Image (tube, grey):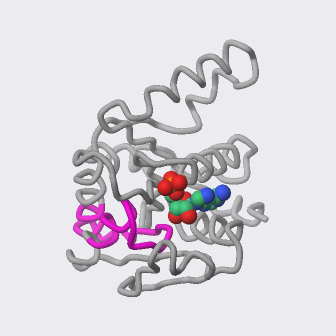
């Protein structure tokens, strides 16, 4: 059973998205604050990421934003974060987000979200970490990803055991119980990040 103190959220920066996705982001921020779990996120005020951070902060939660300095204007760096870390590069951002989190949750998002997701899943595949990862398939948003992964497995590029790399849920309420039920991360793997 995992003792979780912080969760990194990967999700979209677009503001023109479905109400159900926006509500999910807000609910997740709220839940983290209620459970006294820090939210680690991309540090912007835009899209689902901004909604989750605002909800967590409004509820008195701890929010750690990690944003590269060149994106502070474009993604509207969230000055109200409990801690706002600026980095020089995207790689540094992703590494810092990964280091500060005990687990990862993925809500609907775009290409940036996919990049972050596949990086953290493939780092796990390579044994660089073993932190829980939960894909949150709100309203079937990630269904097309299943067919791509099935196709890749059928062609022997992706092992069937990929299902062990992350869990999948369909609602915000399932995230924390699922993360807590997964094996705790081993801290001795951390030195392998770089
Ligand atoms: P998106 O899912 O495209 O809306 O992007 C979500 C977040 O991912 C935003 O904060 C982007 O800055 C970030 N992002 C975009 N591209 C990358 C990348 N190559 N590596 C890491 N993060 C990225």
Q: Which residues are magenta?
A: 29-54
Q: Toward the viewer: 68 or 129?
A: 68
Q: Is residue 172 left or right of residue 135?
A: left
Q: Position of residue 156 (x, y in %)?
A: 75, 17
Residue 103 visible (yes or no): no
Q: Is residue 128 above or below residue 43?
A: above
Q: Position of residue 25 (x, y in %)?
A: 30, 56
Image quadrant occupied by the C terminus:
bottom right
User: Which image quadrant is residue 38 in?
Assistant: bottom left
Q: Is residue 117 above or below residue 33?
A: above
User: Which image quadrant is residue 188 in?
Assistant: bottom right
Q: Is residue 190 left or right of residue 107?
A: right
For ligand 1, the image quadrant comes to bottom right
- Looking at the image, which residue is at 40% across and 44% down? 181
Q: Toward the viewer: 157 or 18?
A: 18
Q: Position of residue 90 (x, y in %)?
A: 67, 68
For residue 106: magenta?
A: no
- Looking at the image, which residue is at 48% across and 26% down? 144
Q: Is residue 17 above or below residue 137?
A: below
């Amino acid at each position: 059973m995992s003792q979780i103190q912080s969760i990194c959220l990967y999700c979209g920066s677009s503001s023109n998205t479905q109400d159900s996705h926006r509500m999910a982001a807000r609910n997740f921020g709220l839940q983290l604050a209620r459970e006294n779990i820090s939210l680690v996120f991309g540090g912007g005020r835009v899209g689902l990421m901004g909604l989750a951070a605002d909800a967590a902060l409004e509820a008195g939660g701890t929010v750690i934003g990690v944003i590269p300095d060149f994106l502070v204007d474009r993604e509207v760096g969230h000055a109200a974060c409990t801690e706002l870390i600026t980095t020089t590069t995207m790689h540094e951002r992703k590494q810092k987000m990964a280091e500060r989190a005990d687990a990862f949750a993925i809500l609907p998002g775009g290409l940036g979200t996919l990049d972050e997701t596949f990086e953290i899943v493939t780092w796990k595949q390579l044994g660089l970490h073993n932190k829980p990862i939960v894909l949150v398939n709100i309203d079937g948003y990630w269904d097309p990803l299943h067919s791509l992964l099935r196709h890749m497995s059928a062609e022997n590029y992706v092992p069937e055991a990929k299902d062990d790399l992350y869990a999948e849920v369909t609602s915000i309420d399932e995230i924390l119980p699922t993360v807590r039920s997964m094996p705790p991360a081993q801290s001795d793997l951390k030195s392998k990040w770089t």
